[in-house]
Image (cartoon, grey):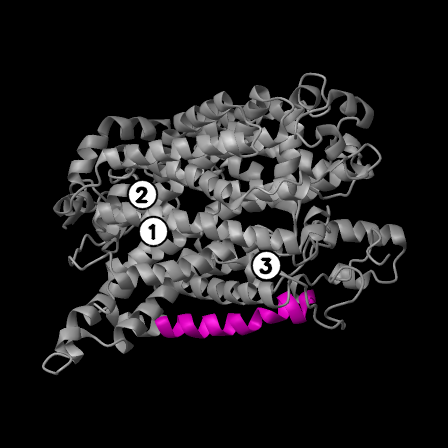
Amino acid sequence: MSTNCISIGEKESPVSPHSEEVISPTSEKVYGEGECASNDGDAIFVKGEPVIATGRDVSFYLVDPRDDGDPALTFRSLFIGTIFACLGAALCQIYAFKPVQVSVSTVFLLLLIYSVGLAWAKFIPRRSSVEGTRFERLGPILEFFNPGEFKIKEHAIATLVASTAAQGNTAVLNFAVQRLYYNTDVNAITAVLATFSTSCFGYGLCGLLRPLTVYPSEMVYWLNLPTVTIFQSLHFDTTANHKRMKLFWLAFAGMFIWEIFPSYIFPLLNGISVFCLASQHASPSIQNMFTNIFGGTDGNEGLGLLSISLDWQYITSAYLSLPLIQQANCWVGYALCYIILAVIYYSNVWNSLTFPMLSTSIFSSNGSVYDQSTVFGSTSQLNQTALNEVGLPYMAGSNVWANITANLSIGGLLAHCICFWGPYLRDTLRNSHSDIRSDPHWKAMQRYKEAPFWWYIGLLVLAFFSALIVIFKGQTTLPWYSYIVALLLGTFVTPFSQLLFARMGNGIATNQLMKMVGGAIAPGRPVANLYFSMWSHDVISQSVGLAGDLKIGQYLKIPPRVMFLTQVWGTILGAAINYVVMVSIVNAQRTILIDPNGTNVWSGQVVQLLNTDAITWSLAKELYGPGGRYFIVPLSLLIGVVPTVIQWFVAKRWPTIGPVKVDSIILPIIYACSAVMSSGTNSTITSSIIVGLVSQFWLRKYHPGWFRKYNYVLGGALDGGAQVMIFILSFAVFGASGVPRPFPAWAGNPAKGNVDYCNGNGALS
């Protein structure tokens, strides 16, 4: 396309915030020397290369519309996808019980599947190998098992089955909460039906909404672009594949071997703190303070300030992918987190000194674990007399702050979406039809039969009645009418969340909001609150994730009907495998999972938080109402709106202040990151910042060619090596299904105290 350079000082139309330069949607870009716009206004070119700034740029310049018409759904793609779905779902559930929650890398899955697919195509006999021989009649059978070259669509189907199964689902964790805190063993059929219903209801909604939230060019789902890029690079740019795959396997093998050291043999490497090592002979009060501030290797040990971690399983490749501006917003949140959590604890706000500095559990006023079994009994419903005797529960100050920031984020992101991104949502709603017609990927998909709407409606009906079975036959304590309200609420929010996530790369974390509504509708019923949140928030999150997969299918030209079957199959697999792994871990590690601190290997912080939220929001009137000790938490929903509105007015008057673009400050991200250290293992923060700077600043800026070719491949390999080793260690020595086998004690794996030698707070007692 010819271009027409414009003079310096002319301004560009507002663009999406997800370009390589991460331009905010309300910013105005002044072109420098060598920059120009295409003569039809479609894109900006710099030195002959388009700057990817909008969804239209992605469709026309970044993602190749090529379609070779190769088969997608084959025995090979489904078999490989199913095998790796088992691995992905198991890993997902294992990390739900780790001190740091980590998602299973889709890049890792696709690269591993690619290698297996190539080996399958090469070594499994083909039809051509028997043609002209007496075994020629076996040709159709051999072709069924090995249809030939492993191409992009088979690769994509196998990966999407695996990644769909590897998506987390709160439903399974709800069953863990019931097992740990309410002595309720939900049977497998009920568990799978509940998980299936939330996932498939979300998928049904995203299918009905796909003309609005998937088909248009501006519906990009920016976080999926690395995945799409790697798919097309592997299959369309074959000359560079050898080096990419060599790097992948070298890095995978290196990290696979290395991970055994920080996670098992030498856990001190998970958090090296000079301050902790230097405090061995300090007074007890100094050791306690150093543990709270600088310790962070064990679960809920401390804030981990300036600790260096060499354990990749907790660092992850997320920091190789997230734009630097987003990470920078988080860094501001981290700095605030260190200060705010320390101030809350040492100034004894909310009686914090009585409880651990970091915890997601609930406590009695004297600091002991709260006796919820007496208050809620065998029926999981409030006994007012027992509550009067036991008293209301307390939360650690860090957990209160985490709840506050959750609501600040919701209010702030709503305000940010309306003030800064409102025009883009309006344009999307107005122009979606014309945008669809002009999209080259949508046009290419017209050769395939569409999945009819009645398929998705049928899925909604099936999911609805599956959940009703759970309501009436399971141990949910949720009234049927509350279930209807939860679904209606989730259905109402879903299209907005999809639009925001698709266009802007950000969504609204609504789980806190759903718990508030659930507490109002079903007071005194903590288990009911768990399920209300599941059938409202989980429907939204599943819908957003599956809609992103549908967009991958459109970019890669996967037939819509094949996508439908693929995602339903992956959903069913994930529901079953997650449940089986959860039961195994909960049964084997029950004592650790209900311990407010946990260990550096296992932690119940996620299920503890789910239980804490369920308990406290079921007592919303007493705890969160006017006059309640935590009234600031719901009030934060409104407070979060105000700073963003002020920021918007400032941005209108002063778009930049010094070197900072005002609209590049995303307050909801800062709020969320200012509570990151409120629980779990915190020794990885400094290392994650270093990784982000190396990748998104140094490599991206000074070695862009290497970055484009190898950055995401390297990240997937490192994630894969670490996660596969953790999968093996979890069942071999960490006790995921039985008795743990700890490594013998030595200086790098002390027998007593915290592994980073921050031994305050009674760690040696």
Look at the numbered discs 1 and 2 and tell me whether their residues touch, using CB distance below 8 Å.
yes
Q: Which residue is mark 3?
A: 687
- State the image quarter where residue 336 is shown: top right
- The mark that comes first in sequence, 1 or 3, is 1
Please provide percent x and percent y for residue 211.
24, 34
Residue identified by numbered label 1: 225
Q: Is residue 226 above or below residue 666?
A: below
Left or right placement of residue 750 versus residue 206 in this view = right
Mark 3 secondary-structure assignment? helix
Drawn side of residue 700 relative to residue 63, left or right:
right
Residue 196 picture quarter: top left
Image quarter where the C terminus lies is bottom right
Give the residues in magenta. Answer: 245-268
Residue placed furthest toward the front: 473
- Measured Cα–Cα span from mark 2 to mark 3: 30 Å
Q: Position of residue 579 (x, y in %)?
A: 52, 49
Residue 504, image x and y in percent?
38, 38
Q: Nearest the camera: 580 or 307? A: 580
Crowding around mark 1 (Cα neighbors within 10 Å: few <14, some 14 to 19, many 20+) is: some
Res. 173 in view: yes
Check if residue 252 falls in the magenta segment.
Answer: yes
Q: Pointer 2: what residue?
A: 220
> Which is more toward the observer, 338 or 204?
204
